[in-house]
Amino acid sequence: HLSELFSHSDLLQTLYKREAFLRTDGEDLRKQFLAHIESLELLDYKCFSNSYPDIDIIYHVIIVPTRARATGISSITTANP
């Protein structure tokens, strides 16, 4: 479906914001963008699409601390209660 979408620049201009990578002239950039998007589990459609103006996506963020530093001081931090 995406290959078909890429072949119609008029649709890309209608459906996607000007700053979206899908509207770039370089096909390599579009392929790179799609590879990145496919690697994500959850997308923020507001950032690149005009097709979903009222969508709300809830993010859950977990910050995992690295190993204790040489000083022996470490802390545990999370964005979720």
Image: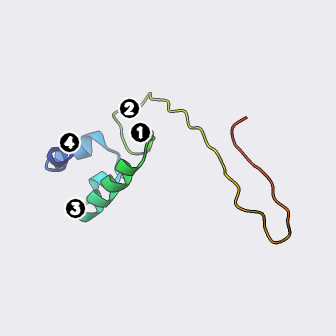
54, 41: nearer the viewer: 41
Q: Amino acid at mark 4?
A: Leu
Which amino acid type is shown beneath numbered disc 1?
Answer: Tyr
- In which quarter of the view is residue 59 placed? top right
Is there CB contact under 8 Å for labels 1 and 2? yes
What is the CA distance from the residue labelled 1 to the residue labelled 2? Answer: 7 Å
Residue at numbered disc 2: 52
**Mark 2 neighbour density, 10 Å: few (under 14) some (14–19) many (20 or more):** few
Q: Which residue is mark 4?
A: 11
Between the residue at mark 4 and the residue at mark 2, the CA separation in whole angstroms equals: 15 Å
- Image coordinates of residue 28 in percent, x first then y, are 25, 64
Marks 1 and 4 sit apart, C-alpha to C-alpha, by 17 Å
Identified at 29% across, 62% down, the residue is 29
> Where does the N terminus fall, quadrant-wise?
top left
| Residue 45 marker | 1
Pointer 1 or 4: first along the chain: 4
Label pair 2/3, CB-CB below 8 angstroms: no
Is residue 68 visible in the rendered image? The answer is: yes
Task: Where is residue 65? Give x, y as percent.
Answer: 71, 55
Q: Could you tell whether 24 is left or right of 37 in the image?
A: left
Which quadrant holds residue 81? top right
Cα–Cα span, label 4 and label 3: 16 Å
Circle 2: element type: loop
Mark 1: few/some/many CA within 10 Å (<14, 14-19, 20+): some
- Please report contact status of discs 1 and 4: CB closer than 8 Å, yes or no: no
Location of mark 3 (residue): 27
Q: Indicate whether 24 appears above or below 58.
A: below
The residue type indicated by label 2 comes to Tyr
Which three-letter amino acid code belongs to the residue tagged 3?
Glu
Q: Secondary structure at mark 4?
A: helix
Among the two numbered marks 4 and 3 on one chain, the one whose residue lies closer to the N terminus: 4
Of circles 1 and 4, the one toward us is 1
